[in-house]
């Protein structure tokens, strides 16, 4: 083999090694959460296989955006962990508590809080209380088609999509569903463990 061929081959191996080193943290975190399930590890939320729930093109409209602004979907927030809740614009007491819990859960992550986006998917045209919008400044509020959400999001046997908080990873995979009337402290433990273990987002 000529010297130039050897140099080319060596260069390719070095490139493959760099790619492998860069990809290793992401591959390890996914392997840990989706494949390896140590007997001592328990999750409060239900781990979902994202292959069964591919994210649809929701074509939502950001609250407060002009009518002429283009529709967007959750892919607009790629690169962040998304804590998602679904409800009517009326947002009754249970909805408001869930929004408060999500805000506090994000804040409780300290320096890692910037890795998380709060998302409220609004399923109708009911006007939203201005004070509620102010209380949750920074949350992403999107009006979306309720039927598309029902076709996408899994529920428990005795619940509906408005009963749950869903977690979407930075790659756009639906990966966890928290139970109806979820305990915020237990969600916090799951979220903290996940952010520590993951090198993405």
Image: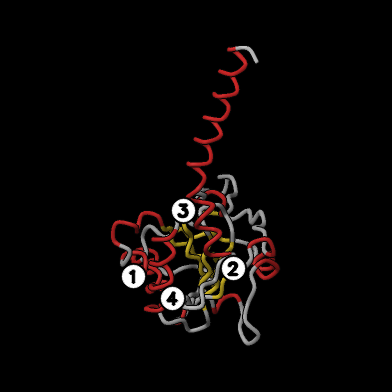
Q: Is residue 115 above or below residue 146?
A: above
Question: Quick check: 133 left or right of 32?
Answer: left
Label 2: how many Cα within 10 Å (few below 14, some 14–19, many 20+): some
**Front disc: 1 or 2:** 1
- CA gap, disc 3 to disc 1? 17 Å
Query: Cβ–Cβ below 8 Å for labels 3 and 1?
Result: no
- Determine the secondary structure under disc 4: helix
- Position of 66 relative to 164 (above/below): above
Question: Residue at label 1?
Answer: 104
Which residue is at a point 60% across and 75% down the rendered structure image? 161
Q: Nearer the viewer, mark 4 or mark 3?
A: 3
Q: Secondary structure at mark 1?
A: helix
* Closer to the eye: label 4 or 2: 4
Q: Return the disc, 2 or 3, that comes first in the chain's sequence.
A: 3
- Judging from the image, what secondary structure is the residue with disc 2 in? loop
Question: As drawn, is 5 to the left or to the right of 140?
Answer: right
Residue in the image at 42% along x and 71% along y: 99
- Neighbor class of circle 3 (other Cα within 10 Å; few <14, some 14-19, many 20+) is many
Q: State the image coordinates of residue 135 (x, y, percent, origin top left).
A: 34, 67
Precedes in sequence: disc 4 or disc 2: 4
Q: How many marks?
A: 4
Q: Which residue position holds label 3?
A: 80
Q: Answer with mark 3 or mark 1, whichever residue precedes in sequence.
A: 3
Which residue in the structure is indicated by mark 4?
98
Instruction: Say whether disc 1 or disc 2 marks the residue closer to the N-terminus.
Output: 1
Q: CA distance from mark 1 to mark 4?
A: 10 Å
């Amino acid at each position: 083999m000529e010297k130039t061929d050897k140099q080319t081959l060596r260069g390719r191996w070095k490139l493959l090694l760099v790619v492998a080193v860069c990809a290793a943290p992401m591959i390890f975190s996914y392997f840990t959460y989706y494949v390896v399930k140590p007997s001592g590890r328990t999750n409060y939320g239900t781990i979902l296989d994202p292959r069964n729930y591919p994210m649809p093109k929701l074509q939502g409209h950001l609250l407060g955006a002009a009518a002429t602004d283009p529709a967007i979907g959750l892919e607009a927030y790629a690169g962040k962990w998304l804590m998602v809740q679904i409800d009517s614009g009326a947002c009754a007491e249970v909805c408001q508590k869930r929004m408060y819990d999500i805000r506090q859960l994000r804040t409780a992550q300290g320096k890692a809080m910037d890795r998380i986006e709060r998302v409220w998917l609004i399923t109708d045209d009911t006007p939203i209380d201005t004070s509620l919008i102010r209380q949750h400044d920074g949350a992403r509020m999107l009006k979306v088609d309720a039927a598309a959400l029902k076709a996408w999001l899994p529920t428990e046997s005795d619940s509906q999509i408005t009963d749950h908080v869903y977690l979407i990873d930075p790659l756009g995979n639906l990966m966890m569903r928290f139970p109806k009337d979820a305990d915020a402290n237990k969600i916090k433990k799951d979220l903290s463990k996940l952010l520590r273990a993951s090198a993405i987002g």
